[in-house]
Amino acid sequence: MLELPEAVTLARQINQTLTGKTIVAARANTSPHKFAFFQGDPETYPDKLQNQIIGEASARGSLIATGIGTERVLLLGDGGLRILYHEQEKTLPKKQQLLIRFDDSTYLTVSVSGWGAVWLMTHEEQAAHKYAGYEGVSPISDEFTESYLDALFAAVPPHDKRSIKYFIVSDPKIWGVANGYLQDILFRAGLHPRRRVVSLTDKDRQHLYGAIRTTVREAIAANGRVTERDLFNQRGNYTPLMYTKTKSTPCTVCGTPVERISYLGGSCYLCPNCQPLPEV
């Protein structure tokens, strides 16, 4: 699943490799997928894309936004989506939800295996879209300060039952962070994913802020997680501290075996000693 570090990596590679190229042909939805989401009818994509020049790309949370000519933007991202650059036709995947051919006979393909956005929008459509138009505060930006995070906590009612996992990935959410990086953030902060937000102390919040900044910055510097791939089909270099391969292995801090729990629609990996769940 793409999150902010992967989106930053892909946007940087698109700028270095694709920006300025002209699209000479395109195909969309040739391999229909129930959870591949398009903007409008994908059959209109080829005409909208042909003869357009690739503009600059940027990360918008877990989405990669790439300028298409002067009127449109291509937004790609979310879960189970592979974005690849091809210098030769023979490397093209058999199935894809979007295929773009450039004037130098290179290609870009987008393949959805889980679910993902393949949105080609005008700037007006993007601004009006519930998700594509969302303007969050990136956890690596100067605006993401301890005061900003404190304000999010302050908006939580005293008797609210939401957990810290729900707070980070759902409401109000940290832009571009989902269940993948959540594991390391909570481990570094010493917080159990079920821990109620209202129970966090000032020190807990300080640790959480530092864990968010550290984890996301380290992952960006490493070009994303080892479980994800970049534009050139290369794995990232960030090995998570807590994920499927660390289950039952000793915690790197205290040696307690790492546990896996199912919570809020996904697996969570944690050290029960370093991340205790206080009694309510």
Image (spheres, grey):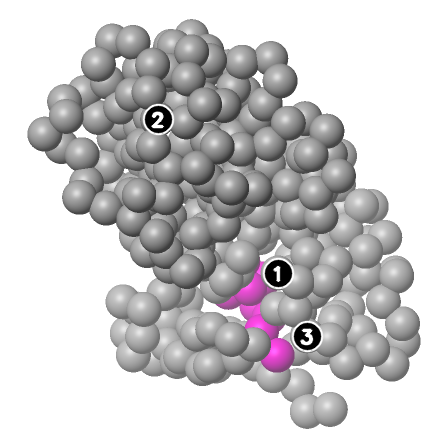
Residue placed under numbered mark 3 in the picture: 163
Residue drawn at x 83%, y 78% is 160
CB atoms of marks 3 and 2 within 8 Å: no
Q: How would you rate the neighbour count of disc 3 (Cα within 10 Å): few for under 14, some for 14-19, many for 20 or more?
A: some
Residue placed under numbered mark 2 in the picture: 26
* Disc 2, SS: strand
Mark number displayed over residue 242? none
* Disc 3, SS: loop
Q: Amino acid at mark 1?
A: Val
Residue drawn at x 67%, y 34% is 126
Name the spot of residue 243 as percent of width and height, x first: 36, 65
Q: Amino acid at mark 3?
A: Ser
Q: Is residue 190 magenta?
A: yes
Residue placed under numbered mark 1 in the picture: 169
Which of the two labelled residues, at mark 1 and mark 3, occupies the earlier sequence position?
3
Q: How would you rate the neighbour count of disc 2 (Cα within 10 Å): few for under 14, some for 14-19, many for 20 or more?
A: many
* Front label number (1 vs 2): 2
Quick check: can you spot residue 145? yes
Res 139 → quadrant? top right
From the viewer's side, name the closer residue of 136 and 255.
Answer: 136
